[in-house]
Image (cartoon, rainbow, N blue to C red):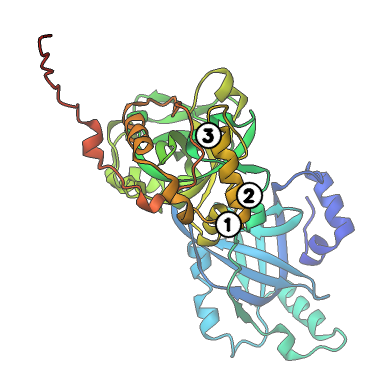
Amino acid sequence: MPSLLISILLRHPLLSDFRDKTSLNNQATLSEVSADYVIGSVVGIGDIVPVMSAAGKKIRRTIILEDVDGRRLDLTFWDTWASMWDPYINKREAIEHLVIILQLGKVKYWDGIPAIHNALFGTKIFINRNIPKIAAFKKRVQERDGYEANQVKIELFTPEVKVVSIAEFFHGAINRMVGGIRDSEPDSHCIVYAMIHRIHKEHGWAYTSCKKCNKKVDILHRQNRPPVYVCEEHGTVQPASRFKVIVRVIDKSGSAPLLFFNNNLVKLSRHTAWELIEKYNMDPYEYWPEELDNIVGKKCLFKLFYSEYNMAKNNHTYHCDSFSEDKELINHFKNNFKDTDTDDDDEESSDDLAQSTTKENNATIEDSIDEYDSDMHTASTTRDSTTSLDGSSSKKRKLIIDLDEVKSEPEDNISKTHELVAVKIEPED
């Protein structure tokens, strides 16, 4: 591949040609290739951003490069490469013009926008070195029309934090009570507001995956040699430790098991599988890390997928696509909740609830709690303690509830066997 200057990377016609040469297409949202080198003026240095990844806790920093024509490109540096920019931040006022060359970086495209990352091995960086390429670049910048020295001064910035909007989170999904999940159409998304009641620890918590596709790998142990990790799709690969945890969520209509994979559980627990495996230095199949117990009792919006497989196989463990603890999203769910499905036995009460909700402008969950009766609460509690991973299944009741009234049952109490009660039979008269 020919050398790639930053100006070449940012010129759109050549960028399209560059994609074609690297087997990318317009539909690709993320791809990687390697660039021989890029050169440019450093005009922006971002704050350090902590990142939770499959490899543990890492740090990331974005650097903004600018070419002779003023076009810009992001460079993303990780760990020691991220922290090495601290001295340049401290003396940025004294630096007249900072130019770098980055060799053998990794080019990534996200939604068609290129960025350069340092690779694990082979990447080299030259910062304001007295070499011909940097000297020639500085001269070209200074010779451009309207050049002023402050145009290449380094600015500090804080990267924007991605905030999921109401429209994005609720797009294509139906609001449900937990007990009404099974009433959804197959291959559709539901959103429930529920509490994590307990963790199904019997199903484990981590697995060894392929870094490329996240699927479980086969481990081939060899005598006196490191094991080999084989992916069915990609052959011999580098492994990664990832979460796979089943939790039970509950509201006053019932309970259901949700399957959490790596990214969501990392966000929920603030730990990574790799970090916990390194800490305990044991086979993850032989223990349960107590750090994961902190997710019990959390109240969230859960966006889950009700699949054709769930219905056809009567398997009611649902895949959790995303979750949110954001108060704005939770309030939106409460204020706009309206279950439109009805049962024959409950049609009249559901219609009354729907009419009441409309009249009161989608009254909040807290305002509807008075409609909850103690008999239903008893049935729901019994159902949660006795149902298996098939989920809740009894007749649903159209209720709007507030989870703040639901108390988490201690894990120790869940596993206890109920004592047998002797029943005395009185003789008939």
Helix, strand, or loop for circle 2? helix
Q: Residue at horizontal 13%, vertical 18%?
A: 423
User: In the image shown, does 136 or 407 lie closer to the viewer?
Assistant: 407
| Mark seen at residue 403 | none
Residue 368, x across and y down, in percent:
48, 51
Circle 1 residue = 332
Residue 261 % position (x, y) = 49, 39
Q: Where is residue 23 shown, x and y percent of the image?
A: 78, 41
Q: Could you classify mark 2 by the number of other residues whose Cα lies within 10 Å: few (under 14), some (14-19), or many (20 or more)?
A: some
Q: Dot 3, crowdedness within 10 Å: few (<14), some or many (≥20)?
A: many
Q: Secondary structure at mark 1?
A: helix
- Marks 3 and 1 sit apart, C-alpha to C-alpha, by 19 Å
> Residue sitting at 38 percent across and 25 percent down?
388
Of 107 and 223, which appears nearest the observer?
107
In primary-sequence order, the first of circles 3 and 1 is 3
Is mark 2 in CB contact (under 8 Å) with mark 1? yes
Q: Which mark is residue 170?
A: 2
In the picture of the structure, the residue carrying the numbered disc 3 is: 180
Give whichever of discs 2 and 3 has the lower sequence position.
Answer: 2
